[in-house]
Image (cartoon, rainbow, N blue to C red):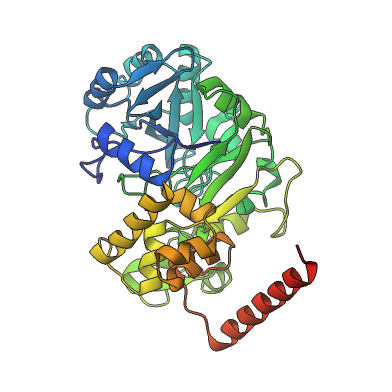
Amino acid sequence: MFVCDFHIHSKYSRATSKSMDLDGISLGAKKKGLDLVGTGDFTHPKWLEELKQKLKEVENSGLYLYKDVFFMLTSEVSTVFETNGKIKKIHHVIHAPSFEIVEQINDSLSRYGDLSLDGRPTLSMRASELVEILMSISKDIVVIPAHVWTPWFSLFGSKSGFDSVEECYEDQTKHIFALETGLSSDPEMNWRLSKLDRFALVSNSDAHSPHPWRLGREANVFKLEELSYWEIFDSIKNKDPKRFLFTIEVDPNYGKYHYTGHRKCNVSLHPKESIKRGNVCPVCGKPLTIGVLQRVEELADRLEGFVPQNAIPFKRLLPLYEIISFSLGVNKLYSKEVLKIHDTLIQKFGNELNVLLKVNYEKLSEVVDKKIADSIIRVRNGELKFIPGYDGVYGVPVFEDSQDQQKEKKLKRSIQKSLFEFEGP
């Protein structure tokens, strides 16, 4: 089984940790339990030079190796263009199987923007033009629209997006076969649009830091006979459930743009309430930032809960650091107390994804407080509730139950225990 996070950024992107070099990324990947990571930012000249110096090519795979971690050559670019009198700003993740192809990509894209200004460059070109140019270089290049529902810089974004993939990529839509869900949406939300059935759904962290609570917080899980660039994308394109097993998602309520709201006024609204108020902030009267949930509602033609026949399943998780932090009521991003517990669990059980997905309650409670062990199991079982994120503010998990919820939970566990004892060995 291979766990892959294709969309990250290097130290050459804005607002990114200086530790996002190959050493930092590799260390973070091992702690998380990732087998393969995207390089991010191959369009940046300095980062590309470092990649060429340090990555070792894995023969006939389209992949590279550094300190026992596989890397795929990837980069995110922002295209800015005008359509029907409106400015559109769309982010795309580009994947390539060789440095030779990357150099051709950079040579072509450098005519549309300065690639040295940012690891995620801004290009003055249409989305369709980007794809057309890339396909003329190599049909092995893969373009995936990034975080497709985020209000800004995305395919369906409320601020500058479109209502369909075809409107964005025009005649080049034929080369788009997958969409990235982003933190504020999950496959279940995307399944509500029948026009998206033909696209595979992938999930990536878009990490700006190598910390395990950023890197790999969303990822893709494969079962492949051999790990190769072509095998990965063939399994994605064909939505092959035997090879593309599932995606790892954070609960969309955790994302920074799930609900509609206005951060400056601390206003967060469910779509029904937002629509009732005319999408205007009840405090200051300015327009609200339309969240992902409301945008999905606007475009959906199916009820909640619909599952397409060929859908790839998913698992909702939360970074281990945040589970520990919220369980203990420690609201610091970098807490020595939390980090100590976090690192103890990883050292004991190998990596974070092992802890989150595999280790049972009894073994967890031998290492950490039972409250933390219980919280990990609750996340694994999808029993967690959230205060939804909005307008750039992350959602907050709620681990404390009301008295009624605690009673219901104890009753369910009692019934499950009775059933287990009745069944016998």
Q: Residue at x 59, y 87 (%)?
A: 404
- Asked whether, in this view, residue 79 is left or right of residue 358, the answer is left
Outermost residue, bottom direction?
403
In the image, residue 265 sits, relative to residue 117, either above or below, namely below
In the image, residue 135 sits, relative to residue 293, either above or below, namely above
Tell me where residue 300 appears, x and y as whole percent.
66, 53
**Residue 21 visible, this angle:** no
Q: Residue at x 41, y 47 (%)?
A: 351
Outermost residue, front direction?
425
Closer-to-camera residue (335/145): 335
Quadrant where the C terminus sits is: bottom right
- Asked whether, in this view, residue 274 is left or right of residue 347, the answer is right
Tell me where residue 103 appears, x and y as whole percent.
34, 14
Q: Residue at x 40, y 63 (%)?
A: 367
- Asked whether, in this view, residue 274 is left or right of residue 308, the answer is left
Closer-to-camera residue (26/333): 26
Tell me where residue 264 appears, x and y as whole percent.
31, 69
**Residue 148 visible, this angle:** yes
Quadrant where the N terminus sits is: top right
Location of residue 164 by image quarter: top right
